[in-house]
Image (cartoon, rainbow, N blue to C red):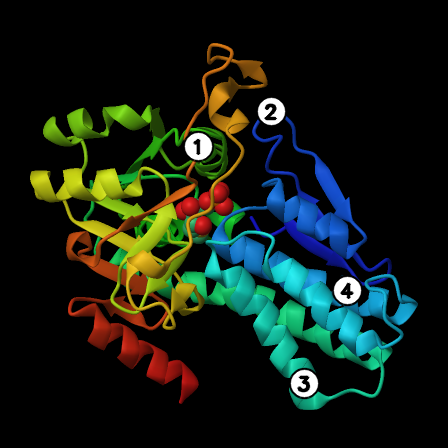
Amino acid sequence: MTDHIRFDAQSNTLDLLDQRALPLVEERLYCRTLDSVIEAIKSLAVRGAPAIGVSAAWGCVIAAREAGLDTVGGSDDWRENLDSALDRLAASRPTAVNLVWAVEHMRALWKQKNPANSAELHTLWLAEAARVQAADVAANQTMGAFGAALLDDGDTVLTHCNAGALATAGWGTALGVIRSAIAEGKRIRVISDETRPVLQGARLTAYELARDGIPVMAACDNAAGLLMKKGLVQKIVVGADRIAANGDTANKIGTYGLAVLAKEHGIPFYIAAPLSTIDPTVLTGDGIPIEERPDSEVAELAGTRILPEGVGAYNFAFDVTPSQYIAGIITEAGVLSAPYEQSIAEALRGVTG
Ligand code: MRU
């Protein structure tokens, strides 16, 4: 699946499969303005760290056109207006570093090439956003091949949230590893945690795996301990929203508990993520900002309030798994292992030359 993020250059429109409506309705969301891209990211119409990054790259393209029309800011200087538009885009969700990565990548290219006007910048960014999108799929397929070697024929892999094609430009990170193992002929089954509060596991992971004919069972989040104890889980593979320089990893709320349970049961717990998810400026997980979302996501189920009136709810969207629980970080540069300070620094050196 790669058509969930499309860009129509003719109409300068980002065309998204609206993930809020899945799996019941396959509905497209057309973003023609930067504000609508920001709203799509905030509202989870597009979600998953790499998919947010790719959408943000397209958001820059839309912003470049708006800068030419002077609709993004209040100054006469299109460059100044565009800079503040990019800042707004980068701030639309705080935890997934791929968002900032993509915006700063586009901004750096702009400053480096210094085009004479916004129309030239638009052309430059159009090509670059397409490249960022294609590179994400390629990275996932490379990481899939590295990760597939960690899975054995007959394994059942537990995953949390959705780190699949929908969460990326295609193929997926955690689900990409599973897809690659299956492509190699291994028989792999998947357990998808429901992933409250907004059920990315039940709605999205189950949807895309079932669509590909990959055997998947859903389980409520609090079943994980029992499933491990019963020997029903051989490996755990999840995605990541931000990885600190020491390997501590932020991912969907509930991931940390899974990692601790995995250690208790001797089950290898892997992270699969592209190098763009690593934030070397954050030294440990304590420095990763954790998004807090509206408590209505917890208070309601499918639009119906399930909490008594007047009762509030915690809604931290992510937690951080300390690196000591992580058996390996699967990237497009290979499987990184402890000590992560060293393996991460080496992998990033390979990227920057
Ligand atoms: O709030 P979401 O749905 O954007 O959270 C997504 C996750 O936590 C994913 O596991 C993570 O972004 C990795 S996606 C390849």
In the rendered view, would you say 207 is above or below 138? above
Q: Position of residue 92 (x, y in %)?
A: 60, 53
Residue 93 relative to residue 237: left or right: right
Residue 243 image point, x, y percent: 34, 61
Quadrant housing residue 134: bottom right
Task: Quickly name the residue at label 3.
Answer: 111
Residue drawn at x 8%, y 40% is: 264
What is the three-letter code of the residue carrying label 2? Answer: Leu
Q: Give the Cα distance between marks 1 and 4.
A: 34 Å
Q: Position of residue 14 (x, y in %)?
A: 74, 54
Estimate the spatial distance between the alpha carbons at disc 2 and disc 1, rounded to whole Å: 12 Å
Q: Which of 349/320 is in front?
A: 320
Q: CA distance from mark 3 to mark 2?
A: 44 Å
Q: Is residue 318 left or right of residue 22?
A: left
x and y percent of residue 268 in the render? 16, 49
SS of the residue under disc 2: loop
> Which of the two residues, 52 or 305, is positioned nearer the viewer here?
305
Mark 4 crowd level (few <14, some 14–19, many ≥20, 10 Å Cα)? many
Q: Tag 1, which secondary structure?
A: helix
Out of 250 and 24, give the one closest to the viewer.
Answer: 250
On the image, numbered disc 4 is attached to which residue?
63
Residue at 35%, 60% (x, y): give it: 287
Crowding around mark 1 (Cα neighbors within 10 Å: few <14, some 14 to 19, many 20+) is many
Distance between the alpha carbons at the discs numbered 4 and 2: 32 Å
Q: How many marks?
A: 4
Amino acid identity at mark 4: Ala
State how far apart marks 1 and 3 are (Cα).
42 Å
Q: Which residue is mark 1?
A: 206
Q: Residue at x 55, y 54 (%)?
A: 51
Tag shown at residue 24: 2
